[in-house]
Amino acid sequence: MARYAIIRLVRLIPQVLLVVTLLFVLFRMLPGDPAQLIAGLTASAAEIARVRHQLGLDKPLWVQYGVFLAQAVQGNLGQSISYGQPVTTVVAAHLAPTVELTVSSIVLTVVLGIPAGILSAVRPRGLVGYASTLVSVVFLAVPNFWLGLLLVEWLSVKTHVLPAVGWGGPASLVLPTLAIAARLVALVARMTRSSMLDVSFEDYVRTARAKGLSATRVLLRHMLKPTLPPVITIIGLQAGYLLGGALVIEVLFAIPGIGQLMVTGVATRDYPLVQGITLFYVAAFMLINLLVDISYGWLDPRVRYA
């Protein structure tokens, strides 16, 4: 497993390099001049040229790219144009809200989604099974930003139970977590139900039942564990997405996280900031996928790492 992890980490390097290179080129093809934004709309051509020179934007594109890579290898992602601080400092200052939102959403997804899927699989034609399927379909079809608006209307504007926007304290975490986790709970419940129904017809499950094992023991020891790999895959992918910044939800609830920071960086053409955020996002997403792959060996002993 250690050898497999090292090989995967080495393979991540060219993938990260490719993504960063594409972003570096494509982002500079967008209309707009960050030097113009910083100098002001009424600035003279000489002032704009001076700002462009300070930012290094007057150099050829390949020179800018080389400087960026050389600094990135040393852990220096450059200076944020809009914040006037190192990119690593700016990203670190906005990381905590995104991490808290990600962790709370994933925990709620696991706590509600997996049990709901199990109950639905145990009684697929019962009231619980039909109700779980119906709720899952509804939440999968509802956009999280629309659900967020409804939650704000019901629990904040009308009842004043929870704060509508802002960040600070557990109360401000409830509405955005519910808005994000609703769809994830439905997705995990559906995946758990489908996987458990497939496993229930396997020979080793029939053998366990024929030996007289209790239904609970068969469910937890022989059915649940083999169904977890695809469920863990879904959770890992969603965790990577959330850690990269649940952009719409963070903007909707005015959460000062990575997603909100990305919006600011794009709006101000802050090249170093957007590059730094994207590099963090790609690295986090790939690392989570690696951890998910490694977990397969623990969940299913039949898995072998090449």
Image (spheres, rainbow, N blue to C red):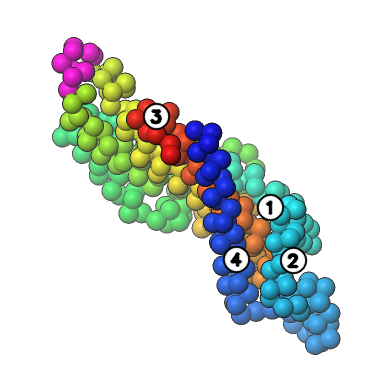
Q: Answer whether residue 56 is visible to the viewer in this image.
A: yes
Q: Which structural element holds mark 1?
A: helix
Graded by Cα atoms within 10 Å as few (under 14), some (14 to 19) or many (20 or more), the crowding at tag 3 reads some
Q: Which mark is residue 53?
A: none
Relative to residue 25, is residue 208 depicted above or below?
A: above
Q: Nearer the viewer, mark 3 or mark 1?
A: 3
Q: Which structural element holds mark 2?
A: helix
Residue 97 location, quadrant: top right
Give the amino acid at mark 1. Answer: Val
Instruction: Point out the tag, 1 or 4, that comes first from the N-terminus.
Output: 4
Q: Which range of residues does the magenta coloring cover?
A: 205-214
Relative to residue 107, is residue 215 depicted above or below?
A: above
Residue at mark 4 to residue at mark 3: CA–CA distance: 36 Å
Residue at mark 3 to residue at mark 1: CA–CA distance: 34 Å
Q: Answer whether residue 242 is visible to the viewer in this image.
A: no
Residue named by callout 3: 299
- Marks 3 & 2, CB-CB < 8 Å contact: no
Instruction: Point out the tag, 4 or 3, that comes first from the N-terminus.
Output: 4
Instruction: Point out the tag, 1 or 2, that comes first from the N-terminus.
Output: 2
Give the amino acid at mark 4. Answer: Thr
Q: Please tell me which residue is depicted at 40% across the width and 44% down the height of the picture.
A: 234
The image position of residue 295, as x and y in percent, is: 45, 33
Give the amino acid at mark 3. Answer: Leu
The image position of residue 39, as x and y in percent, is: 79, 77
Give the amino acid at mark 2. Answer: Val
Residue named by callout 1: 91
Predominant SS of the magenta segment:
helix
Image position of 206 (left or right of 8): left
Residue named by callout 2: 67
